[in-house]
Image: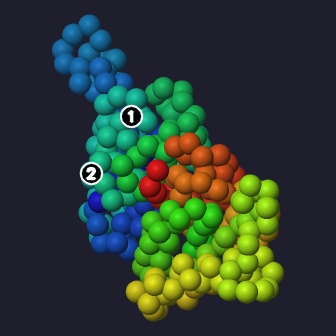
Amino acid sequence: MIVVGVDGSRAGLEAVAWAANEAALRDVPLRVVHAIHRWAAEAGPGRYAEVAQWMRQGAETVLAAGIETARRLQPQLKAEAKILPGDPREALIRESERADLLVVGNHGLSAVRGLLVGSVAYGVAGHAACHVVVVRENPAASSGEILAGLDSSPRGGPVLEFAFGEAALRGAELRVLHVWSRHEAGGRIPPSRGGGGSVEESQLRQLEETLAGRRERYPDVTVIPEVVKGHPVDALTEAARGADLLVIGSRGRGGLAGMVLGSVSHALLHRAPGPVAVVRTPA
């Protein structure tokens, strides 16, 4: 099941559109959810019953718009709506425990709590129990390319697995980009393996070795490995302009590293021009 959060904003409907198409590709159900205050979601007769009813009706209107968007794009899709009680971030994280994928919008304003949806997106991307896709805007037309960003850590397996799977589902090319800098090895230039060649050549060989096993498992996926020197945010933001989806990790060390949701991952959610998949990776 794919879960998508909506809040009444245009960004929320963009997320629904992406999620509906993804659910159709995967042949799984779609659940459209919207969070409101717990007391409003669970209130019965009483002093504030009318206010609670008004809030629930508002939530149902938001959900209905989401369901309509999903069914307009994918008429055969099995889709359902659900009101979630509580803080949007906490509610979506709880809901992610029952999902294969959680999809949220990148920006906008929460109709109920006045929270920037960006705050919700950043919160769930770092803590959800499943992979998260954050949608700023859907590409006007498919480019037929998935972009995966890899750092220098050994934790890139889940990122590659998700990216290969998406490319196979869509019949798309997979571009795997590794961005390196002198800071990767404590200020030293990374050593060349296998004898001779530039740093880029050495790291490209290492990247090819990393990709070898999955090339065999996904023989129909065309893979384009690439190594560039620079800052990962700048390089991946620029490369993502030509991609249908950017796939990055949520944890690790190196370029895409740091804390629960690394600084590079956080920046890419803010700057990437299209949908970004944040893949759960080991601590």
Name the residue nearer the viewer: 137 or 259: 259
What is the number of the mark on residue 98?
Answer: 2
Q: Residue furthest front?
A: 195
Residue 132 in view in this figure: yes
Colour approach in the figure: rainbow
Residue drawn at 29 percent across, 20 percent down: 39
Tag 2: amino acid: Arg
Residue drawn at 60 percent across, 46 percent down: 258
Mark 2 nearby-residue class (10 Å; few <14, some 14–19, many ≥20): some
Residue 166 in view in this figure: no
Query: What is the C-alpha distance between the residues marked 2 and 1?
Result: 14 Å
Question: Mark 1 — residue?
Answer: 90
Residue drawn at 52 percent across, 43 percent down: 260
Q: Check the picture and name the quadrant holding the N terminus.
A: bottom left
Q: Is residue 150 shown left or right of residue 82?
A: right
Vertical comparison of 81 with 232: above or below: above
